[in-house]
Image (spheres, helix red, strand yellow):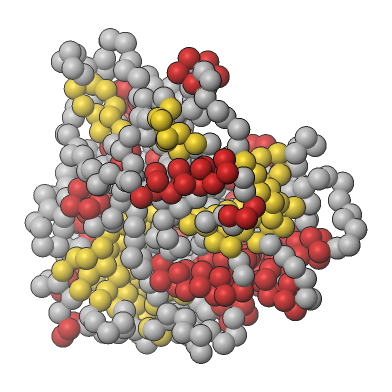
Amino acid sequence: MFPASRYSSKAHRCIRALQTVQVEHAAPQLYATLNTRRTCSSVSTPRITTHYTVHSRDKDSRWEGVEMERFADEADVVIVGGGPAGLSAAIRLKQLANEHEKELRVCLVEKASQIGAHTLSGACLEPSALTELIPDWKERGAPLNTPVTEDVFSILTEKHRIPVPILPGLPMVNHGNYIVRLGNFVRWLGEQAEELGVELYPGYAAAEVLFHEDGSVKGIATNDVGISKDGSPKDVFERGMELHAKVTLFGEGCHGHLAKQLYKQFNLRENCEPQTYAIGLKEVWAIDEKKWRPGRTEHSVGWPLNRHTYGGSFLYHLNEGEPLVALGFVVGLDYSNPYLSPFREFQRWKHHPFVAATLEGGTRIAYGARALNEGGFQSIPKLTFPGGLLIGCSPGFMNVPKIKGTHTAMKSGMLAAEAVFPKITAESLDSETTGLHAPEYAETLKNSWVWKELHAVRNIRPSFHNYFGLYGGMAYTGVFYWIFRGKEPWTLKHCGLDANQLKPAKDCTPIEYPKPDGKLSFDLLSSVALSGTNHEGDQPPHLTLKDDSVPVSRNLSIYDGPEQRFCPAGVYEYVPLETGEGMRLQINAQNCVHCKTCDIKDPSQNINWVVPEGGGGPAYNGM
């Protein structure tokens, strides 16, 4: 909770209302997806979006007389997002404050109900940044229990496997790294932050960026609670809280919805390429102990994807007291066929003989999905602006060929802390704006190993855009990265926004996916049930549409409704109109696992993901 001593009685009521809404979530409601044909409707468009970010409450008579005052609190630094970057920044700030004997209030808000509950990654962790931040992490009990002992890389055909040697220096070498359940690691980071005095507020979703009169960032506001699905106020409605700070660090993760606003407000993407993304789907299995190889990492490319669809798989053997494996499938969101379903490709991949041999006789115990940045060096935006900074996977520091971004995210948070600390604690603030500007952060990042690492691999991902696709990209990597270590004097470009890459359905071949067998492959709804996803049912859908008519008039008619395939949680489905004439889009927002894929891949760029009430979403347990 926010410190009680800082608030009036009205503020206490606001906090109690926030708590009430968080604990009174309805049971998870999962909705079946209907198989539909491309059909357009000639009748008026049913209203889908009721969120106040689309339909202003100022013009809604139901909101007349409703108290809209928000209560504010002050901190030195506010951090948005309780992931590796945000927590590393918080820890480093408090370390510096202790070293210099300074009082420093650091507040971190996280939309998940618990720190780590929305965290999902492979994950094979490179411990370099962790060792810099907390040198005695082993003694402190960091949950890095599985050092990598063996690397396997394969090219898969439909029935066979072609082994690929992993030569020293290639990105897939994992010697010295650890297989982790990243949610557990993030939870541990949260414990370290709290010990240092960081104020953590899980269950509070940052919904709005606040600005000073001079245009600099003032802080954030958490979202309002107690709003009905139709957009009207409930009896328990309360405004969100404002958190003001000298500087705000935005570490929301991949495709953060506040970062999207900041890109436009400060034109931060003016001098970089558009970000490109992938979707990663993951499961955790308990397998036969005889097949368990603790410390073994397996990666593959090839089947079931064609050579022009970027993607691949991982299968990691954990060593946590029981025979567990973490496995997943990554598909680049620059694919062109609207009939492709990343979820079904993942399920199909598990039937490959090389993969099935590990899973047969096992039990699936967890499922989840998350988008990830793949733009790399070329897509890094401007990182600083008056009053704020971007850190971690929000701007995108993932090393794509390594499939690792935790170490770079952590380092970016640490560098951000070191850049803002002297400004915050200076006796006389030397700033042209009310919100502090720390351009030194970008400079120190460019002089760090993060920049060097991302620059070296900058051409690997875009090199796949050639006639030979996957195989041309692998050849390029072998020559220009393994031999020349990324020192070629050119920088390749990406193909533009992922949303613009889909071809019309009439120009593509439908993909026939096999039915799940319930042993190795599964349907979508039973998968979402394993994610623990839960939202308050009676609230406006947080998957908002700029225009409710576009899904049927454009997405369905031209692209055969790709949102019903690229969503890994069954949120979007086209259902018949009640009149029987035509179709309408139904949004099952309760299913949403917060992966952000819809906001990225929608060919009309009509979907805008905003935060639901705090605490909603998946409840991952060490994903």
Point 60% across, 85% down: residue? 135
Q: Can see residue 189?
A: no
Judged left or right of residue 100, residue 604 is left
Q: Examine the rendered structure and indicate whether residue 30 appears above or below residue 321.
A: above
Question: Would residue 384 appear left or right of 350 to someone viewing this image?
Answer: right
In front of the other: 253 or 534? 534
Q: Could you say which quadrant of the image residue 433 lies in?
A: top right
Depth order, front residue of 282/491? 282
Relative to 352, say whether 290 is above or below.
below
User: On the picture, is 318 further left or further right than 192?
Assistant: left
Residue with the most extreme front position: 9
Please, which residue is most extreme toward the top here?
43
Residue at x 68%, y 75% (from the top left corner): 95
Residue located at (48% from left, 14% from top) = 61
Query: In the displayed structure, does residue 523 sit left or right of residue 293?
Result: left
Q: Position of residue 132 (x, y in %)?
A: 63, 80
Residue 162 x, y percent position in the rendering: 27, 72
Count of numbered tags: 0
Q: Position of residue 339 (x, y in %)?
A: 27, 39
Indicate the position of residue 507 as horizontal and vertical percent values: 30, 31
Residue 159 visible to the viewer: yes
Q: Quadrant of the C terminus?
A: bottom left
Rendering quarter of residue 416 = bottom right
Q: Nearer the viewer, residue 392 or 75?
A: 75
Residue at the image position 35 percent from the left and 29 percent from the top: 229
Closer to the camera, 337 or 19? 19
